[in-house]
Amino acid sequence: MNNLLNYFDLHRGEENKKEVLSDVVANVSFRGANLWILACAIVIASIGLNVNSTAVIIGAMLISPLMVPIVGAGFALGTYNFPLLKKSLKNLFIATSVSLAVASLYFLITPFKETQSELIARTSPNIYDVLIAFFGGLVGVIAITRVEKGNPIPGVAIATALMPPLCTAGYGIAIWKMSYFFGAIYLYTINCFFICIATFFIVKYLKYPLAKNIDESQEKKVKFGISTLIFLLIIPSFYFAYKLYNEKKFSQHVTEYIDNELTQKGYTVIYKKTDLSTNPKKIELACLEKLNDNDEKVLNDKMKYYQIENSKLKIRRDTVDLKNDILNELGRKQIADNETETLAKKLQNELLNYKFDNAHLLAESKVLFPSIHNLSMAKHSFNEGTDSMQIVGVMLYQSPSELDSMDATKLKQWLLTKLELKDIVLVHQ
């Protein structure tokens, strides 16, 4: 049993506690370079949310220093270092205020104010966001307390996602939509608090030295305050999770309803829109075939059999408005399709750069080297992603026996000159 527990022993590979605390205290402040880096990261994240680019958002999260004061607050709570707690919270407030101001300013001046899916995703946090923040925080603080910091830190920055909610809150301020603002701030608060709590637990588990000895009653007050905040923050997340579950279930029932009552009966649905914010919920449909008022009434009556009775079906027949809605929908789809097509063409071009006309090469090589009866030539990259990356040509050739050194040298020189390569590797098959 002891051998098994040794595998989970966090004291193995642990950094000196004084050095860890010293690094945490030194990096808590948001002044000078840290504040500039944060502002730039906020602008990058805002652009990513604005153009719905996940890659840009991830890049912004990687360069953001926002997690440092949160971890500092966790260390302060775990060691009862109240001056450090005060300093960490002060710097977190400064960082949050600057981030909100920069994000709001960006979304005020940008001409593109359409609410993208990446923005909406940060407005309704649930219990899963709590779990991500807590376990992401655990990984982060464990990495900080190691001698070898390893690779988890960038992953924690991405998983806990502190930047996008702040930018979304700024977007809510810029377009004056407070539901977006409060939803995003709630997600940001969840992330901050549960990263802090995860840090607190690890600091306690590793038995970091206390900055101040406090009596039992004070310790109980600290633990009671933490427990109360956990309870207050988790309760709304369960509500949002339950709401999300109901929305998914409703969408499944609507899909089943449309499939059974329209698609399988020969009707072609060309437009569908649901609105879950109203009471009753609204479902708008349009079909290629003409449906009259009686058909609409019959379809409404059948909703109760699909557990969507608290809904109102409307069959769209206003051709002008419907045409505009469909064109808008097709326009958004076309943009997505164009982006996919552009990426496919880019990959295809990159692939062509690594290929050669093997049939032509084989015809020429047979004249110079009659023993070669088949070959395949391609480029390969070595040490990719590093400063020493190089492109090398690799030829696989088939012949009764391997070319002798003189013929191999001639073949290499011919290929280097013909294909304008720096190096070629010959492989006999």
Image (cartoon, helix red, strand yellow):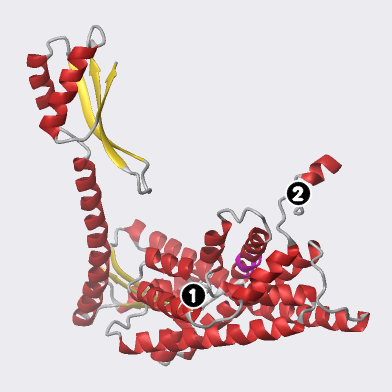
| Residue 373 picture location, percent across and down | 17, 13
Q: What residue type is disc 1 on?
A: Met
The image quarter containing residue 172 is bottom left
Left or right relative to 151: residue 341: left
Rounded to the nearest angstrom, the CA distance separating label 1 from label 2 is: 32 Å
Q: In the rendered structure, which segment of residues is drawn in magenta?
A: 130-134
Q: Which residue is mark 1?
A: 163
Look at the image and say whether residue 132 sits in the magenta stretch: yes
Q: What residue type is disc 2 on?
A: Phe
Binning the other alpha carbons within 10 Å of mark 2 as few (below 14), some (14 to 19) or many (20 upward) gives few
Look at the image and say whether residue 110 sits in the magenta stretch: no
* Residue closest to the far right: 216
Left or right relative to 321: residue 85: right
* Residue closest to the far bottom: 176
Is the magenta region chiefly helix, strand or loop?
helix
Q: Which residue is mark 2?
A: 8
Nearest to N terminus: mark 1 or mark 2: 2
- Taking the spot 75% from the left edge, 45% from the top edge, the residue there is 7
Q: Secondary structure at mark 2?
A: loop
Pick the residue in front: 427 or 336: 427
- Counting every numbered tag in the picture gives 2
